[in-house]
Image (spheres, coloured by chain):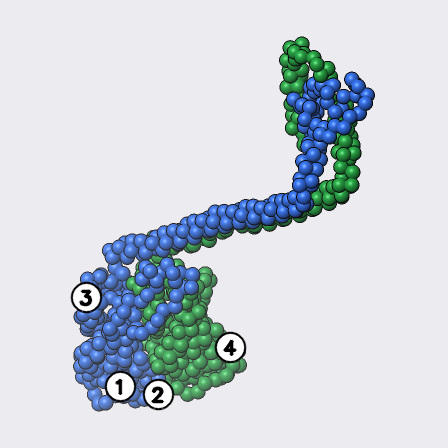
Chain colours: A blue, B green
Amino acid sequence: MNRFIQIALLVVFGITTFVAMSSTYTVNEVEQVIITQFGKPIGEPVTTAGLKVKVPFVQEVNPIDKRILEWDGNPSDMPTKDKLYISVDLFARWRITDPLQYFLRLRDERSAQSRLDDILGSETRNAVAKHELIEIIRTTKNRVPLRDALLTDAEKDLKMGLLVPIQKGRKLVEEEIFTAAAEKVRVFGIELLDIRFKRINYNESVRPKIYDRMISERRQIAERFLSEGNGEAARIRGNRVRDLNKAQSEAYRQVEEIRGVADAKASEIYAKAYNQSPQSVGFYEFTRTMQSYKSIIGENTTLVLSTGSDLFKFLKKMAPDGVTVPASSARGK
Amino acid sequence: MSTQDGSGGGGNPWGGGGNSGGGNNPGPDVEDIVRQGQDRLKSMIPGGSPKGIIIIAIAVLAGLGAWTSYYTVPSDSVAVVQRFGAYLKEVPPGLHFKLPLGVDDATIVPVKRQLKQEFGFTTPGARDPYQRSRTRNGARESQKLETQMVTGDLNAALVEWVVQYRISEPVKFLFEVREPSETLRYVSESVMREVVGDRTVDEVITIGRQEIETEALTKMQALSTKYAMGISIDQVQLKNINPPEPVQDSFNEVNQAQQEKEKLINEARRDYNKVIPLAEGEKDQRIREADGYRLKRINEAQGDVARFTALFAEYTKAPEVTLRRIYIETLQEVMPAIRSKVIVDEATRGILPFLNLDSQNLGAQQAGTPKKERP
């Protein structure tokens, strides 16, 4: 008997606990709850967090996230207006604003995500196909790029270091996609908060062409540098020859001028002294001739002199006579 | 339930610190443990009475309650406490108590820790799963995808960067956005591409790095405020920025060409410098030498003239004697040096044939010709 009561108590305790547990539920801060009775939603969604009460066994708790949720699209390839294949990866943020609607139309998040995939995917394709690639790459219309001071000369001529001009820009394209998609997802009780391009890239098949273009652009610059270097070097070498000739010829000219002046001056001095009278002219001639003998007549000179010469006339006779003009009989050979 | 589990794991970038998702419905876990414990006890005490089972059950519950009624918050974190899922309070570091058995749930959020996210590369050994990119198809491949960007002049570049951030508002971080850290990754990638997309490849690779960091930081901060993620971004740092692999060689070519240009110019300058200053010096040398010649000529002329004038003055006093004296003195000086002297009588004729002029000429040619030219 005692043992029966004990078992009965245990059973009652167990049942009570079970009923208590299935008639209460907690709502987390991050979620809202829809109560369903045999699968049919009952009453308004519960949006405040805390411990709540429901009818046990019959009613079921369906938690739905209240936070801002993310949608991360798969990268997909699509053509732009300028026929470039690019791979676009988007992300969006969304929120369940009408949980009842959401619950009825989609039931769980997986179907919500796949609906977003479809809608955002097609809107993205539409928007991308309507715009040229640069419109979804660039954002600010009037930005003037910085340019490397070193590169400027080469690049200005090559029209490099410039941004491709745009009409709208990334922000506006994003907005177009957003506006179109937000409208379409509203029926699911979903509010689209915003969408942004995460990755935009050249498709694998386009890449080699892009790389080729980049390589040819770089090569151009490299060649430009080389030819600038060679040109400048040639200029300097030209300067070298010019300056060398200039220095040498100037030196020659000045040297000759100075020597000319010197010779003229010396001539003037000599002439002035020797030309003072006819007597001085004769005396100059005599002394200068005498002086020249010293250098003209050397060791190997054979001198044939006659006894009639002024020097040897005394070999024949002693008496000096009045010879006035010596010289002339001495002959150098 | 699947979303709940996902959110619980996702909200904890520090890995296993708290148990936020479980707070919603802790029943199954506790029941499992209790049931397991009961089973084990039953097997340990064969044939035990129901009373004993009740006592053991109560003891286990009490133990479990005691075990789940306290928690410690590390010094770099705060704990966010939820009661039956509803937000209750924020708790500072230290030892704290809570209502046990899943009534209260404390989530530890490391608010003071500097967190970072790496894009395009990974530091090995990082424990934060959001520090690196999610690997969908291989770590290497997803890193490569992360770095590839298109620049504003439609070139391609590979950009690696780091975002340093902290959790500034734990309540927002936990309750506003489902995947704040993953969202931050999206935001960061999106903003970086936006900023790079507005720049030329040269700006991205060389001159514009600083500007990119600043602008990306500003834009990321604005977005993280707008998204109410409870995250504050401190820094954006660019790491390696390279042109795509196939193009790298040609970028190097440009650098080399730039160096080559400098080299060519410098070599030409070297040649110039080697020659021109020397030529200038030589020019000056020659001018100075000419100047010397001028001085020499004039001084010599003046000397000669002075000597002549002096002599001439004496000559005019006694012309004949002076002439004779000079003549004889000169010949006296000149004659001794002459090896062959022939003195003939005035009357003698036809002597020349007897002189052996040939041999003397030969000798003269052999030894003496240059001497004749001596000044």
Q: Chain of mark 1?
A: A
- Judge from the rendering whether residue A23 lies leftward or rightward of residue B95; answer left or right: left
Q: Chain of mark 3?
A: A
Q: Secondary structure at mark 1?
A: loop
Q: Secondary structure at mark 4?
A: loop
Q: Earlier in the sequence, mark 3 or mark 2?
A: 2
Are the residues flagged by discs 4 and 3 in contact, CB closer than 8 Å?
no
Residue B7: x and y in percent read 34, 75
Position of the C terminus of chain A by quadrant: top right
Determine which of the numbered discs, if any, sits on residue A50 in the image: 2
Query: Residue flagged by tag 2: what amino acid is it?
Result: Gly
Q: Which residue is at a point 67% across and 43% down the rendered structure image? A: A277
- Judge from the rendering whether residue A201 lies leftward or rightward of residue B65; answer left or right: left
The answer to whether dots 1 and 3 both sit on one chain is yes
Residue A52: x and y in percent read 31, 88
Residue B216: x and y in percent read 39, 73
Query: Residue flagged by tag 4: what amino acid is it?
Result: Asp
Query: Residue flagged by tag 1: what amino acid is it?
Result: Pro
Q: Which residue is at a point 22% across and 76% down the rendered structure image? A: A176
Residue placed most toward the observer, B278 or A257? A257
Position of the N terminus of chain A by quadrant: bottom left
The answer to whether dots 1 and 2 both sit on one chain is yes
Q: Chain of mark 2?
A: A
Residue that label 4 marks: B76
Neighbours of disc 1 within 10 Å: few (<14), some (14-19), many (20+) = some
Neighbours of disc 2 within 10 Å: few (<14), some (14-19), many (20+) = some
Residue that label 1 marks: A56
Residue placed most toward the observer, A299 or A148? A299
Determine which of the numbered discs, if any, sits on residue A81 in the image: 3
